[in-house]
Image: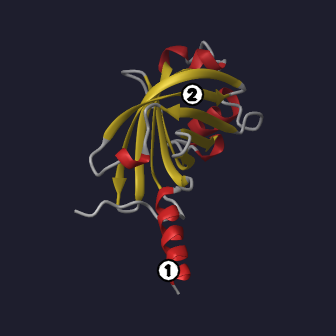
Amino acid sequence: MKRITLFILLFTTFSIFAQDKFKTNTAIVNFEATVPFFEEIKAVNNLGTIVLEPETSTLLCTVVIKDFRFKMDLMQTHFNENYLESDRYPKSVFKGKIEQFNLVDIGETEKEYAVKGKLYLHGKSKIIEMKAFIKKVPEGIQISCNYPIEVADFDIAIPNVVAGKISKTAHTNLAGVLRSNEPMYVTLK
């Protein structure tokens, strides 16, 4: 009987400290490339994927380009066919590391982290740095980050006819609540 109790205790302890990946398939990605005095250029994608591997501090984000939604259908068509060429380049992927990340340090108060990694978009890649805001919520771990994307860095051609109406920098925001199948270490107060 003592062996079974010891085995259960060791298994429970291991489960608390060995964390699986945290993931969501419903991350929200917004971007805006609006120029003052011209039509609003904004889109939202509610189907982004974020994966966090606490053991290696790796953050992986994947977005299907065709899942971005605009207010106007014509903008969405131009975005997919002319600018991002989503049939040819269907996804955007970011893979990076969260600096000085430790799952034990995550609490109910939002904490700022530096993230550095490679963004793949439109057949090109670039090292980018951004700030991530992370905190524990009842459903899991909440993460949000803002980062600018320079369209020239990814060879996204904007025709001269509309070049003055579209910002050369797309301001992007990523947010989601990540969940794990493994039990999470919870601090009791």
- In percent of width and height, residue 72 lies at 52, 41
Pinpoint residue 99: horizontal percent, then vertical percent: 46, 31
Residue 60: x and y in percent read 58, 41
Residue denoted by label 2: 117
Expressed as whole percent of the image width and height from the top left, the position of residue 6 reads 51, 75
Which one is in front, 23 or 149? Answer: 23
Give the amino acid type for the residue marked by disc 1 in the picture: Thr
Among the two numbered marks 2 and 1 on one chain, the one whose residue lies closer to the N terminus:
1
Q: Label 1, secondary structure: give it.
A: helix
Callouts 2 and 1 close, C-beta under 8 Å = no
Quadrant housing residue 69: top right
Few, some or many residues within 10 Å of mark 2 (<14, 14–19, 20+): some
Query: Circle 1 is placed at which residue position?
Result: 5
Q: CA distance from mark 2 to mark 1?
A: 45 Å
Indicate whether 23 appears above or below 165: below
Q: Which residue is most to the front?
A: 2
